[in-house]
Amino acid sequence: MSTVFNDIMSSLNELAEHAQGKETGIVVHRRTSQDVIDIPVFTPQEIRDVRIAADMSQKTFAACVGVSVKSVEAWEGGRSRPDGAARRVLGLMKSNPKFAEEMGLLVTH
């Protein structure tokens, strides 16, 4: 049999032993809530800046974030604030203005 096959079988056997509680030397990495970066809070101007940096109208931005245009207008006007999920998306868009494109949220022509 091939070396690749033997390596795969050896790894699967080691994984099965680990699942049975046997000491195998496998390193398992687990994340906890303490590993998660805090959800950012945005001022109305920062929200507008994120949208402008992404080169989007309020309508397109709202569709990408998953909210109504009225919500984006209210955020930028300081009449309301985005919730946690929207703030997380805003944070991703702030760190990468091409986030919507790269994640397939926009149709490419």
Image (cartoon, rainbow, N blue to C red):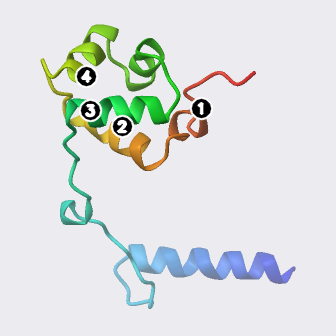
Q: Which residue is mark 3?
A: 45
Q: Distance of mark 1 from mark 4, alpha carbons? A: 25 Å
Q: Distance of mark 3 from mark 4, alpha carbons? A: 6 Å
Q: Which residue is mark 1?
A: 104
Depth-wise, is mark 3 or mark 2 nearer the camera?
3
Q: Which residue is mark 4?
A: 76
Q: Nearer the viewer, residue 20 or 102?
A: 102
Depth-wise, is mark 3 or mark 1 nearer the camera?
3
Q: Distance of mark 3 from mark 1, alpha carbons? A: 26 Å
What amino acid does circle 2 point to?
Val
Local secondary structure at mark 4: helix
Q: Earlier in the sequence, mark 3 or mark 1?
A: 3
Residue closest to the far right: 1
Q: Earlier in the sequence, mark 1 or mark 4?
A: 4
Q: Are marks 3 and 1 in contact (CB under 8 Å)?
A: no
Q: Quadrant of the C terminus?
A: top right
Q: Distance of mark 2 from mark 4, alpha carbons? A: 16 Å
Question: Residue 2 in the image: x percent, y percent?
Answer: 87, 80
Task: Decide: few, some or many residues near mark 1? Use Cα within 10 Å; few <14, some 14-19, many ≥20.
Answer: few
Question: Residue 4 in the image: x percent, y percent?
Answer: 80, 78
Local secondary structure at mark 3: helix
What amino acid does circle 1 point to?
Gly
Q: Earlier in the sequence, mark 3 or mark 4?
A: 3
Task: Decide: few, some or many residues near mark 3? Use Cα within 10 Å; few <14, some 14-19, many ≥20.
Answer: few
Q: Which residue is mark 2?
A: 89
Q: Earlier in the sequence, mark 3 or mark 2?
A: 3
Residue for point 40% across, 44% down: 94
Q: Nearer the viewer, residue 60 or 26?
A: 60
Residue for point 16% across, 27% down: 81
Q: Quadrant of the N terminus?
A: bottom right
